[in-house]
Each structure stands twice: as C-alpha cells, then as structure tokens.
Image (tube, rainbow, N blue to C red):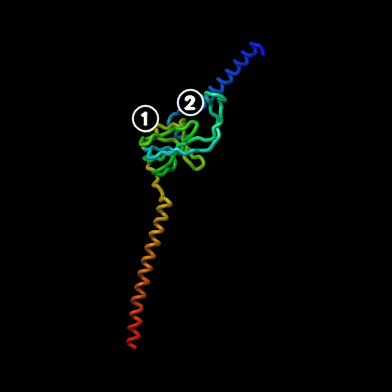
Amino acid sequence: MDKLTSKRLTKIFVLITAWIGLGQSAVLACSCFTPPPDELLQDADVVFAGKVIAENKVRRWDSWIRLKWSPPFIERAEDYYESRTTFEVAAVWKGKIFAKAAVVSGRPCGYYFRNGQEYIVYAKWFDGRLVTGECMGNNKLSDAGEDLATLGSGRPPEPNPPSATNYIGNLITIFLLLSVLGLTGWQARRKYGAGSHEQTHFTR
C-alpha cells in the first residue's frame, strides 16, 4: 500500500469516526425546541404542578449504543437507569391525576427533578405509566411564569384511593370485631341459657 492510499484511508477513517461522534453527540445532547405553553398543553396527556417528595432510580435492561474515547470506540450497553419521581400534586390543568403521583423519566433525553423542588410537569401516558422528558416543557414552578399566565389557576387533584394495605387492614379489623362480638354473645348464651334451664328444672 503506497503512502497516498494510506493517507486517503486515514482521512476516510477520521471522517467516519467524526461523523459517528457528531451523530452520537447530537443524540445525547437532546437539543429541544420548546413550543409555547398552549401547544405543550395540547400535546401532553397530563399537566400538573407539584412538589417532589421522593425520587428513585430504577435499573432497566435494554440495548443501546454509546460512544467511547478508547477502542473499539463504539460499544453496546445492556442496561440503564430511569428515574421515578413522586410528586405531591398541587394543581392540575389537564388529565386525571391523584394527589400523589409518580412520573418516569429515562434515557436518552430524561428530565431529572430535584427532591423538595416544585415543578410544572408535562407528561404522557405510556404502558400505564406517566412518562416525561427533557423536551416536553417541564420547568421549575418559580420559572414558569409564562406557563401559569397561559394555563390559569388549575384545579385540585383527585384524592388518592385507599391502598391495598389499608383495605386488608380494615378487613382484618372488621373480622376481629365480629369475632369478639360472636364470642361475647356465645358466652352470654351459655351463661344465662344454662341458668334459665336450671331454674326451670328446680320449679318442676
């Protein structure tokens, strides 16, 4: 292989590597054009404002490609983490949502909320979960003046339904109460029923 061919191949390799790197960077950067609040409202399934009260990272099994700075430069990653954030909801502008609600966000364009902070959240239903991302218009409530001016005051969230634990606990309480009442009645019948029988026998 002559020097000219070698230089050409080197340039081609560099160009291909740069193209792949730029493509990966563009994907990972998740540059977003944020439309006005009225369009965000129309596009979302649920829009609400609330305070973050809990945040958990959940490991998910998946396949995707990421760029490395060392050979082989590109590798396949098999897992990633998604964030599940629980909110104490204060106001709702669209959709049905409970007073405590969880929103999921993950790669590659996730929006990560901070515990204790208040946000306005735009989310969509996906596989039975509320999902949001960096490009959906989420913002700190203190910086969401334009959103609030467009959306108005909102409405209160739905009250949370009783949990399964509370339901089972209530059933156990009722069962124990009925058992105590039944035992008390049985003891009363045994005591007073036996006394009445002996009195009747004595009279005879």
Looking at the rendered structure, the secondary structure element under dot 1 is: helix
Which x, y percent locates residue 25?
Answer: 51, 24
The quadrant in which the N terminus is found is top right
Tag 2 near tag 1, CB within 8 Å: no
The tally of labels here is: 2
Residue at x-position 48% and y-position 41%: 129
> Which label number is shown at residue 31?
2
Which x, y percent locates residue 136?
Answer: 46, 32
Give the class, few, some or many, for how many residues have Cα within 10 Å of label 1's Cα (few <14, many ≥20). Answer: few
Position of residue 166 relative to residue 112, above or below, is below
Measured in 3D between alpha carbons, the distance from the residue under mark 2 to the one under mark 1, in whole angstroms, is 20 Å
Q: Nearer the viewer, residue 159 or 178?
A: 178
Question: Quick check: 22 left or right of 173?
Answer: right
- The three-letter amino acid code for the residue at tag 2 is Ser
Question: Quick check: 116 left or right of 28?
Answer: left
Quarter of the image holding residue 62?
top right
Q: Nearer the viewer, residue 153 or 77?
A: 77
Residue at x-position 39% and y-position 65%: 179
Q: Is residue 93 visible?
A: no
Looking at the rendered structure, the secondary structure element under dot 2 is: loop
Q: Is residue 107 visible?
A: yes
Q: Nearer the viewer, residue 59 or 95?
A: 59
Residue assigned mark 1:
143
Q: Nearer the viewer, residue 12 or 158?
A: 12
- From the viewer's perspective, is the residue at label 2 or at label 1 nearer? 2
- The three-letter amino acid code for the residue at tag 1 is Asp
